[in-house]
Image (cartoon, grey):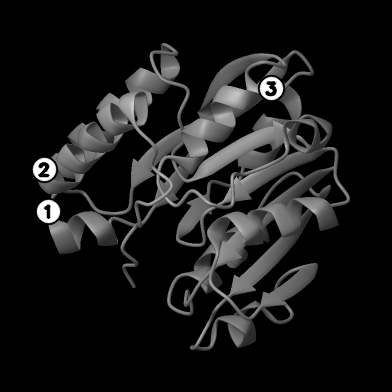
Amino acid sequence: MISIVIPAHNEEGYLGPTLDALQRQTYPWFEAIVVANGCTDDTVEVAKGRCHQLLVLSQKSLGVARNLGARMAKGELLLFLDADTTLDPMALRTVAEDFSKDVAAGTLKGRPDAEHFGYRLIYWLKNSVHRFSLHSGSSGVIICWKDHFMRTGGFDEGLEVRENSELMKRLKRLGTYKYLGDATATTSMRRYEQFGCWRIVWLWIKLWVQSLFGDLHQRRYETVR
């Protein structure tokens, strides 16, 4: 069984399609857990009746939301899914068949939701980096075994930037990293649209360098809705 944990902060405009895409999956043994955190819009109303578990937190916190969803999960496999990311119909079946016990962390092939050359180039590079394990990253999706997740302590709740990579690094002590290129996750380009491609790429590079030499716990990720 796969437990899909979807943290959602003011995601009324994106959460519906994300949950609807789960209903089109060809693999039936899954549960969807939405963790609404610090919402001031209709996120909770959008989630009602569309997921197996709906958890509501009064404060915004991505790490806390993900960790709570993982603790409440009934499945052996955890799939952390961004609220603005949709899975292709075969995605969960691919995960169930190809994510073996010797693999500790993984992600799917990422695809932008807009046919913009800059977006497609960035995701081609990002997918290539993941495919050849040059960086153990994610594209809107993180996959791991629940027992591995609990053993590593889950997400660092004090981190708002590069928290995915930090978790992946700890998970890899328990097994390998795998890129599942036969399944696609289509994610929103809203951050790129607001700030521009190259500004976001420059931010990635800057944060990567800072993570090598400093502490990112004081860095905050600007919310885009």
Q: Which residue is mark 2?
A: 198
For marks 3 and 1 on the same chain, the one whose residue lies earlier in the sequence? 3
Can residue 57 be seen? yes
**At 69% from the left edge and 18% from the top edge, which residue is drawn?**
103
Say whether residue 84 is left or right of residue 66: left
Percent coordinates x, y for residue 203 in the rendering: 21, 42
The quarter of the picture where residue 177 lies is top right
Say whether residue 218 is left or right of residue 146: left
Residue extending furthest toward the right: 74
Question: CB of mark 2 within 8 Å of CB of mark 1?
Answer: yes
Q: Which residue is mark 1?
A: 196
Q: Which residue is mark 3?
A: 104
Q: The disc labelled 3 sits on which kind of residue?
A: Ala
Percent coordinates x, y for residue 185 in the rendering: 48, 44
Instruction: Judge by depth and name the residue closer to the eye, 212 or 149.
Output: 212
Distance of label 2 from label 3 (alpha carbons): 32 Å
Percent coordinates x, y for residue 47 in the rendering: 65, 77
Q: The disc labelled 1 sits on which kind of residue?
A: Gly
For marks 2 and 3 on the same chain, the one whose residue lies earlier in the sequence? 3
Give the vertical position of 195 relative to 154 (above or below).
Answer: below
Crowd class of label 2 (few under 14; some 14 to 19; many from 20; radius 10 Å): few
Q: Number of numbered discs present?
A: 3
Say whether residue 24 is left or right of residue 52: left
**At 84% from the left edge and 57% from the top edge, which residue is drawn?**
72
Say whether residue 124 is left or right of residue 43: left
**At 12% from the left edge and 53% from the top edge, which residue is drawn?**
196
Identify the element where label 2 is drawn: helix
Identify the element where label 1 is drawn: loop
